[in-house]
Image: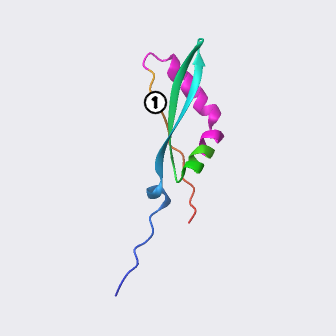
Amino acid sequence: MRREQPSLSPARRAADFKINFQMTNAGARHACSVTIRALSRIDADAIFRDNWFTIEKLARLNLTAEQPGQIRLEAAVPDRG
């Protein structure tokens, strides 16, 4: 008897999307990036826009730190069953 393999869960189909942006801090321009785990680039862009205030706050905190790093945002992947 042949069994159908269950489809992959949305979390397994999700991928990391890196979005680059620039910010100014103390008169200098800085390149920043955020990595968002989502099902598609369109979903990642929507998550980026919806969470911009949080991303900006984290980016500014990172810019003032002695060793600025990359911001990684792990967002819940919606189940589109």
Q: Where is residue 21 in the image (x, y as percent from the top left)?
A: 56, 30
In the image, residue 16 sits, relative to residue 33, either above or below, namely below
Say if the magenta span includes residue 65: yes
Residue 81 in the figure: left or right of residue 6: right
- Badge 1: how crowded within 10 Å, few (<14), some, or many (20+)? few
Residue lying at the far left of the rendered structure: 1
Q: Where is residue 2 in the image (x, y as percent from the top left)?
A: 35, 84
Picture residue at 57% right of the left edge, 26% below the top: 22
In the image, residue 23 sits, relative to residue 48, either above or below, namely above
Image quadrant where residue 81 sits: bottom right
- The secondary structure type at the circle numbered 1 is loop
Image quadrant where residue 24 sits: top right
Number of disc labels: 1
Picture residue at 41% right of the left edge, 78% below the top: 4
Label 1 sits on what residue type?
Gln
Between 5 and 24, the one lying in front of the other is 24
For the N terminus, the image quarter is: bottom left
Residue lying at the far top of the rendered structure: 26
Q: What span is in magenta? A: 47-67
Q: Main secondary structure of the magenta part?
A: helix
Q: Where is residue 53 in the image (x, y as percent from the top left)?
A: 64, 32
Picture residue at 51% right of the left edge, 35% below the top: 34
Say if the magenta span includes residue 58: yes
Between 26 and 81, the one lying in front of the other is 26
Picture residue at 52% right of the left edge, 16% below the top: 64
Q: How is the image coloured?
A: rainbow
Q: Identify the residue position indicated by label 1 in the image.
A: 70
In the image, residue 27 sits, relative to residue 23, either above or below, namely above
Residue 66 in the figure: left or right of residue 21: left
